[in-house]
């Protein structure tokens, strides 16, 4: 208890410790340091007070529709995939208008990263990690495209367009056929080339 009281008094400037006995003004310096420490110690408490204040008459609760708009995570097994469908042939048209400017011709890469690759590109000094070479699940491609693409207008593609452009990118990597339809049932069944390159953490439950 005495140590705790001494620490409190030192932090608030009530108790000074002469860390530089050869200097006459060391006591005053330590008192100033104590006041600075006390000030910085008060910052987290102030921030906590601001957060708590938000519970009392500030802001509003998010509506069901607003929460649903952000609750769009797609699991590896396809849980959460919406209705809709699309194939690579239609996806090529979507890609031409909404994706090509950044990602290049046929997914080869432009201002942004390309999509086409193989697991063999993960070996060596200069590795390439993209959809074709690295990603273990095709559902991740749908999830990311829906929440983040196109870069300048994310969230503007319809579910059918996302299924189609997802199928097109998979087609460019030789994973699905040009007329193979991707939907909530078929997309989770797609086996990505690097699926076996990932090992499940044994500490986590399936």
Image: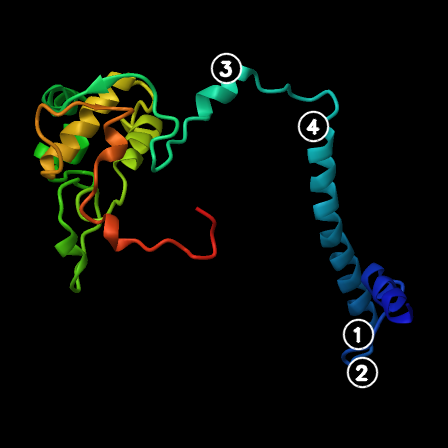
Classed neighbour count for the residue bearing mark 1: other residues with Cα under 10 Å, few (<14), some (14–19), many (≥20): some
Q: Which residue is mark 4?
A: 54
Rendered residue at 72%/27% (across/down): 55
Q: Give the mark, 3 or 2, whose residue is nearer the N terminus.
A: 2
Residue 79 as seen in the image, left or right of residue 169: right
Q: How many marks?
A: 4
Query: Circles 1 and 2: CB distance less than 8 Å?
Result: yes
Q: Give the mark, 3 or 1, whose residue is nearer the N terminus.
A: 1
What's the CA distance linking mark 4 and mark 1? 43 Å
Q: Which residue is mark 2?
A: 21
| Disc number lying in front (4 or 1) | 4
Q: Give the mark, 4 or 2, whose residue is nearer the N terminus.
A: 2
Q: In the rendered view, would you say 190 is above or below 33? A: above
Task: Give the x, y percent position of residue 26.
Answer: 79, 74
Secondary structure at numbered mark 3: helix
Q: Which of the pair 4/124 is nearer the observer?
A: 124
Task: Give the x, y percent position of residue 189.
Answer: 24, 34
The reply to whether residue 187 is in sight is: yes
Residue 175 as seen in the image, left or right of residue 50: left
Query: Circles 3 and 4: CB distance less than 8 Å?
Result: no
Task: Give the x, y percent position of residue 38.
Answer: 78, 56
| Disc number lying in front (3 or 4) | 3
Q: Which residue is mark 1?
A: 26
The reply to whether residue 99 is in sight is: no
Q: Give the mark, 4 or 1, whose residue is nearer the N terminus.
A: 1
Q: Which residue is mark 3?
A: 65
Dividing the picture into quadrants, the one containing residue 140 is top left
Secondary structure at numbered mark 4: loop
Rendered residue at 56%/16% (across/down): 63
Q: Give the mark, 1 or 2, whose residue is nearer the N terminus.
A: 2
């Amino acid at each position: 208890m005495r140590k705790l009281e001494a620490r409190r008094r030192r932090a608030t400037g009530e108790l000074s410790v002469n860390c530089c006995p050869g200097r006459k003004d060391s006591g005053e310096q330590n008192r100033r340091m104590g006041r600075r420490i006390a000030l910085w110690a008060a910052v987290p408490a102030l921030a906590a007070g601001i957060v708590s204040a938000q519970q009392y008459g500030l802001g509003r609760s998010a509506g069901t529709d607003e929460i649903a708009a952000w609750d769009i995570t797609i699991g590896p097994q396809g849980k959460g995939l919406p209705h809709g469908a699309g194939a690579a042939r239609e996806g090529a048209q979507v890609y031409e208008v909404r994706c090509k400017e950044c990602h290049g011709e046929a997914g080869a890469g432009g201002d942004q990263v390309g999509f086409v690759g193989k697991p063999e590109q993960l070996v060596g000094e200069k590795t390439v990690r993209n959809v074709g070479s690295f990603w273990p699940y095709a559902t991740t491609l749908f999830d990311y495209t829906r929440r983040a693409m196109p870069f300048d207008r994310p969230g503007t593609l319809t579910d059918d367009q996302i299924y189609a452009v997802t199928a097109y990118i998979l087609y460019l990597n030789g994973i699905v056929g040009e007329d193979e339809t991707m939907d909530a049932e078929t997309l989770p069944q797609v086996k990505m080339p690097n699926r076996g390159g990932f090992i499940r953490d044994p500490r986590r439950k399936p």
